[in-house]
Amino acid sequence: MSSKTKLTTLGLAMTLVGVTATLQGVATAQTAGMEKGASPDGKIPAYAGAQAPLGGWSFGKFRGDFWKHKGEKALFSIDASNVDKYAANLTAGQIELIKQKKGYRMDVYPSHRECSAPDFVRANTEKNATQAKLDATGEYLETAALPGMPFPAPKSGAEAMWNHLMRYRGVGTEWQKAVTAVSPRPGSDEWIVAESKQVVFSPWGKKGVSTPQQAGSIFNIYFGYETPAALAGQGMVQRIFFNKQPETYYYFTGQRRVRRMPSYAYDAPQIGFENQYLLDEPWLFNGLLDRFTWKLVGKKEIYIPYNDFGMFNFKAKFGDVFKTQGVAPEARRYELHRVYVVEATVKSGVRHVASKKVFYIDEDSGLAVAGEDYDAQGKLWKVKEAYPIPVYELQGACDVEPFVQYDVSNGRYVADQSTIGTNTDIRWYEETNDPRFKDDFYTSESLRSVSER
């Protein structure tokens, strides 16, 4: 292929971003900057807005059984036999998984653009279209009406990432049992499977208008491990701030003490997972942007995880979904959507084990749904995907909780925030007076009290 042909192909596949925010119809749209119309070929439909679940859903019932499109069949599958045919609409990581892992398959379904948000979130998003801004460094969110998407028409990679970090999740999320799993080492059949109680609190998520300064933190998290024996009884509280380092406290069972962990962030390995899982990897990216230079590459049509109710099926058996080589194809659903492509390159003089990260961010919801990490030599290292669904408790706002991360250098993978095999669902709260959704729950004293009960 000539260099001219390559450039032409790239131009067709990726349109450089020049999105102009349009505020017409914000009462029915999730963002002010999305392309609401269908793609020219009709494969990506026009934006439809929130769709109510089928009648009879209540918390504790499997969400997928009440989704409007639950009976759909896959249009086609992508595997090693036809991956080259669809390569223009796949990520580098997806192509690598298909070529590397025997039997890896992506089942592609009709696309549905139904991510929405409550009225007060959409109203704040409308304000943000003209008022939100980053600080002088271009890394920290300085001004925004929250809860709301800060940058509905992002003009930089950092703006697109802040949309992901500030995704609306209500005031908080609760797991009665959250599963974190690491697949076996090559030649072994021994998994690491940890179960924990977990709560995530978004101080800015309540109805109304808040600012980063008023909220104080992007989110606060608590978890307490129940299994395996090596982790049981350990727990953590962490506050992720808008413009300063996280505040982390960890309870160690053997010492019966709480320790402050000032370095437990960025690329520090999470305790208990054989260095397979780093602190800034949950939900594809977690924490501050300040170790990377961020670039908004453009927009592209990609087959991404979407409406993945199978990954939220708490009634499914762990072994039916999480196979040694990867997640069972039947549990994953892919749709064609437009995404923002963001590249993050580690800054000169700054340490991070990943030299570059790439993220694919859904234009409608602002969620990072796929990504890759590259090692110090510039080789593809980790392939990631997260699984969005519309949340019935949040009036159709979409969120990602379960996600998977493949290490293509050693063949192992991490799955986190899952409820597969637990018989308990994730719960989102639009409003609550539960004391766990208050700042004073995320202190060293509170962690000690909860851990020693």
Image (spheres, rainbow, N blue to C red):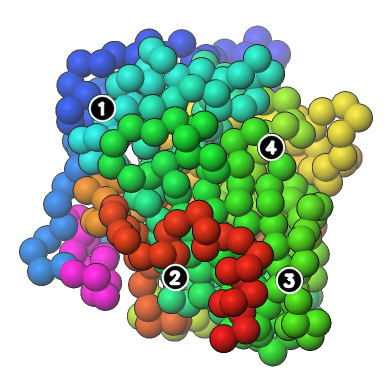
> Between disc 4 and disc 1, whose residue precedes?
1
Q: Tell me what residue is drawn at x 75 percent, y 82 percent.
A: 256
> Between disc 1 and disc 2, whose residue precedes?
1
Residue that lies at the very extreme toward the bottom in this rendered image: 229
Observer-nearest residue: 92 or 193? Answer: 193
The type of residue carrying mark 4 is Lys
Secondary structure type for disc 3: strand
**Crowd tier of the residue under label 1, counting other residues whose Cα lies within 10 Å: few below 14, some 14–19, many 20 or above:** many
Q: Tell me what residue is drawn at x 71 percent, y 73 percent.
A: 251
> Between disc 4 and disc 2, whose residue precedes?
2
Secondary structure type for disc 4: loop
Can you say which quadrant of the picture contains the N terminus? top right
Q: Position of residue 119 (x, y in %)?
A: 20, 35
**Crowd tier of the residue under label 2, counting other residues whose Cα lies within 10 Å: few below 14, some 14–19, many 20 or above:** many
Q: CA distance from mark 4 to mark 3?
A: 22 Å
**Crowd tier of the residue under label 3, counting other residues whose Cα lies within 10 Å: few below 14, some 14–19, many 20 or above:** some
Residue receiving disc 3: 258
> Between disc 3 and disc 1, whose residue precedes?
1
Eye-nearest disc, 4 or 2: 4
Residue receiving disc 1: 123
Q: Are marks 3 and 1 in contact (CB under 8 Å)?
A: no
Q: CA distance from mark 2 to mark 3?
A: 23 Å
Q: Position of residue 439 (x, y in %)?
A: 50, 54
Q: CA distance from mark 1 to mark 2?
A: 29 Å
Residue receiving disc 2: 175
Q: Range of the magenta residues?
A: 58-71
Residue receiving disc 4: 244
**Residue 377 in view of the camera:** yes
> Between disc 4 and disc 3, whose residue precedes?
4
